[in-house]
Amino acid sequence: MIRPRLILCEKTSAWAIALRWALADSGLRVYETRTLADAWQQLVLFPASLLALELRGGNLGEIVRLLVQQRQTFPHGAMVVLARREHADCEWVLREAGAIHVVTSQRDLVPLARLVSRFVQRTSVPSRGLLETIWDRLPWGSP
């Protein structure tokens, strides 16, 4: 199976620790990056992944730009935003830009964990050989 990744971009590991705890039963791994450029590079390598971005004081514009760009460039991927409570008023701007979920508390990660699990199950595709892929695309199916 080719599995999408959960790529997390944050300056510290606070969200990563909380996410690992929330995802403990799912067996999903959190791949950490420290800069938005590194996170974007991981998305280039794994385009059907879920990218979780930390909203900090001065990066709202950059995150909105990435959200819009992600929808256009990687339609099979998705992005969520992790923010402190003082940034809760930005939630609808972020959702309008393309975030599928916005979390404003590390204590409220259970809904995000369920969303991540569903996303990974939905976007995981079995690795198939060229012959099987061609047969599957024929109008009459495989022999």
Image (spheres, rainbow, N blue to C red):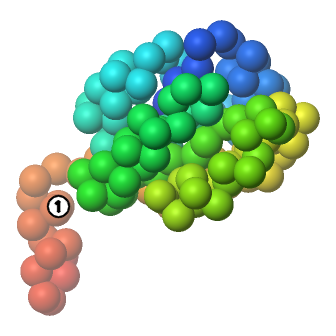
Q: Secondary structure at mark 1?
A: helix
Task: Tell me which residue sits at (74%, 51%) in the image.
Answer: 89
- Does any portion of residue 26 appear in the rendered image? yes
Task: Tell me which residue sits at (46%, 39%) in the image.
Answer: 61
Q: Mark 1 highlights which residue?
A: 132
Report how many numbered discs are placed on residues in the image: 1
Judge whether 17 appears above or below 27 on screen: above
The amino acid pointed to by label 1 is Glu
Judge whether 122 appears above or below 11 on screen: below
Residue 96: image x %, image y %? 53, 64
Q: Is residue 34 left or right of residue 82?
A: left
Quadrant in the picture for residue 142: bottom left
Task: Tell me which residue sits at (17%, 61%) in the image.
Answer: 132
Task: Tell me which residue sits at (80%, 36%) in the image.
Answer: 86
Q: Nearer the viewer, residue 69 or 51?
A: 69
Q: Is residue 86 left or right of residue 66?
A: right
Residue 62: image x %, image y %? 42, 35
Farthest right residue in view: 107
- Quadrant of image for the C terminus: bottom left
